[in-house]
Amino acid sequence: MSLFHLEETGVKSLRIDDFFVIFKDVLAVDFSEENFKRHLSDKKWSELQAREHAMVISLIMESSEVIPFKFGTIFHSISSLKKFIIDNSDILREKTVSIGGREEWTIQVFCNRKVLYKQIDEMSVQAAKLEKEIMASSPGKAYLLKQKKTELIKNEMDRICKDYGLQYLDQFSNLSDSFNQNNLLPKEFTGREDTMIVNATFLVNKKRVPNFKEIFEIRGKRDKNQGFFSKLQGPCPPFSFVSFNRE
């Protein structure tokens, strides 16, 4: 779909002050506060609407700087929309500068603790030291030391996961203009058996994206051997780096 065909989705444009606002008229049967909350529980409906919203923004971004508003941002009238733009014109100009020429990329990192467990003696000095002590001990003492090692391994895997997560955040924040840490998602949300240890969004200058992606791939291949699996998503409109108060 080209920009020319955006009108087929019901999208309209309106010039307000120095801005062109792209919007769509919606029905109260779908988007009144009560009905909207009800529709959001319909996964098929919400995914379709949100996907179209993101698609429109992405298409406009191909030729213009866009301040993306999140799906579900609703104004009850043209006059309230105009008032918002005029009242926040200085902030909107600042946002245009801060996100201009940049894309949002999301990095998620997962740890397969079973794979990490098998390599713990190689990755933990303390675990390796305790294993040597077990091997040199009598059966009775070795049994007690193995129990001690079980607890040590759990703590060491937690530490290693935390260290890997901090390394990712440090390395890729240095390759971006800004970043946000998001909540770690449980397995029932990710649909994976491994554990999420990083969930972050990065605002990356378009000129630096090739380097950002290359370093991510190199790091991902290396860390996979230790049980860490990384996922890169993007480019996306920089939703995470545009926020306004609820009013």
Image: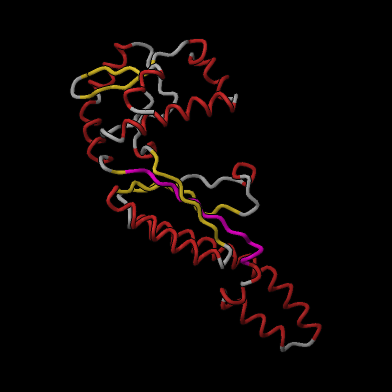
Residue at 77%, 83% in the rendered image: 141
Residue 66, horizontal then vertical, whole percent = 29, 32
- Residue 38 in picture, x, y percent from top left: 58, 19
Number of residue marks: 0
* Left or right, residue 86 beside residue 164: left
Who's the residue at 53% across and 29% down the image?
47
Question: In the displayed structure, does residue 92 sit left or right of residue 29?
Answer: left
Residue furthest right in the image:
140
Q: Is residue 219 above or below residue 209?
A: below
Residue extending farthest to the left is 18
For the point 47% across and 28% down, which residue is it?
Answer: 50
Foreground pick, 153 / 115: 115
Q: In the image, is residue 131 above or below residue 11? A: below
Q: Quadrant of the C terminus?
A: top left
Q: Position of residue 108 (x, y in %)?
A: 50, 51
The span shown in magenta is: 103-116
The vertical placement of 107 against 59, above or below, is below
Tell me where residue 244 sits by quadrant.
Answer: top left
Residue 48 location (% of width, % of height): 52, 26
**Direction from residue 149 to residue 31 in the image, left or right:** left
Residue 114 painted magenta: yes
The one nearer the camera, 24 or 158, is 24
Image position of 138 with respect to 235: above or below? below
Which of the 4 image quadrants contains residue 24? top left
- Give the residue drawn at x 73%, y 75%: 146
136 lies left or right of 105? right
